[in-house]
Amino acid sequence: MKKTILTGLRVNSELTLGNYLGALLPMVRLANKHSKDYNINIFVPDLHSIISDIDGNLKSNTIRSIKYYLAAGLELNDNIHIYRQSRVPAHAELAWVLNCIATMGEMSRMTQYKEKSEGRDSANVGIFDYPVLMAADILLYDATFVPVGEDQFQHIELTRNLAQRFNNRFGETFTVPEETKKQVEFMGVNNGIRIRDLVNPEKKMSKSTAGDNCKIMLSDDPARAAKKIMSATTDSLERIDFNLETQPGISNLLQIEALVNDISLDETIREWSGETRYGELKKQVAASVTTLLANFQEKLAAISDDDVEKLLPKGEAYANTIADKKLTEVYEKIGLR
Ligand code: TYM
């Protein structure tokens, strides 16, 4: 049986360079490398998108987000399955079953929930519960590898726990995805990827942070993006080193440089370590990001909605077949069938 590599990106707004380097590009590189031997599932978690602002543009944003994969260089073939979550009802159904084996305690510990809800009583229940829907997204397809950024690792661990708990209670049903250390190895990186805010590099780069200079959006004019890199916060140590505690800004630039050019972080660190000219490093990273955005945007403009829409019926028929079979097995195991 072929193993499955699966990922999804929420589509509320435009994506950042963090989304691109943390998940989109790793997925595209893995797909292009392994699609002969693995199933590649790329889906749009459109039901996840409504945990935040519901602005009525989700349908077109969904199409745009699939274009992103193509613009990032995804090479299509029969092993690549592209689908929208809301077109596969089994996701929501399995999430309900998993809700009934997940505990309030473990869900309350989810960092993303704490950050997104900020302790507000008015936070919607979807914000609390979306990691369970994410577990369903993964377990329906028996995915082994789930390339995501570091901020989603806790949800991968939750998924593993729910799969193990279900299997122990009801008999072998789900493939347990690999632990995050193995996920990282498979992605060919040293650690989980967390691209940082350019102004406050202790924080991750996020689309929801106010302030244009903090983040690079995939739609940014490349010259404007280069300026943001040139003005990124660094430190006063005057010596380049990879140290996320003492030099988060510099370390972020090294990380970006390595990922954009698909060279190992170790090699990039070796090249720059000990150098004193931060300006040189910034110029180099700005050039790399400029090239990346210019190529990406050119390719994106050449892809039509039709190009994407014609991929979906096949991907969604495939997804429904696999997902329905797994859901039926789950219903049988818990005694509903
Ligand atoms: P989302 O939409 O918040 O983010 C999409 C992907 O981008 C990664 N990411 C980053 N990586 C590195 N540095 C950053 N600054 C950065 N910011 C975001 C995220 O880690 C993620 O991989 N729940 C998920 C979507 C999802 C999903 C799934 C993913 C739903 N179901 C099943 C995989 C499998 C989410 O909200 O990601």
Image (spheres, rainbow, N blue to C red):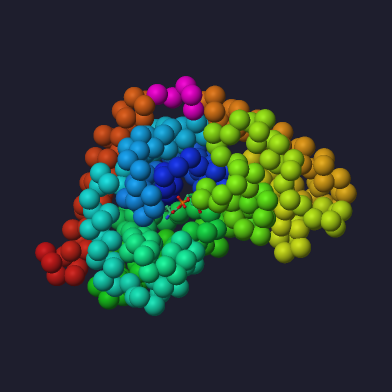
Q: Quadrant of residue 221?
A: top right
**Residue found at x 87% / y 48%:** 275
93 and 187: which is toward the camera: 93
- Front residue (pair 1, 194): 194
Q: Quadrant of residue 296?
A: top right
Q: Which residue occupies the extreme top position in the image? A: 302
In the rendered image, which quarter contains the C terminus? Answer: bottom left
Q: Nearer the viewer, residue 37 or 59?
A: 59
- Residue 326 in view in this figure: no
- Specify the segment rendered in magenta: 300-304
Q: Is residue 228 above or below residue 179?
A: above
Residue lying at 54% horizontally and 28% vertically, measured from the top left: 297
Report if residue 283 lies within the magenta region: no
Q: Tell me where residue 317 appears, x and y as whole percent.
A: 24, 40
The image position of residue 151, as x and y in percent, is: 52, 59
Q: In the rendered view, tell whether residue 65 sits above or below residue 93.
A: above
Residue 6, given in percent of the width and then of the height, sits at 41, 49
Please name the residue shown 27% across and 40% down the image. Answer: 316
Q: Give the overall secondary structure of the magenta segment.
A: loop
> Where in the figure is residue 13, as x and y percent of width and height?
45, 42
* 74, above or below 233, in the image: above
**Pick the front one: 327 or 219:** 219
Give left or right: position of 312 versus 144. left
Farthest left residue in view: 337
Residue 47 visible (yes or no):
yes
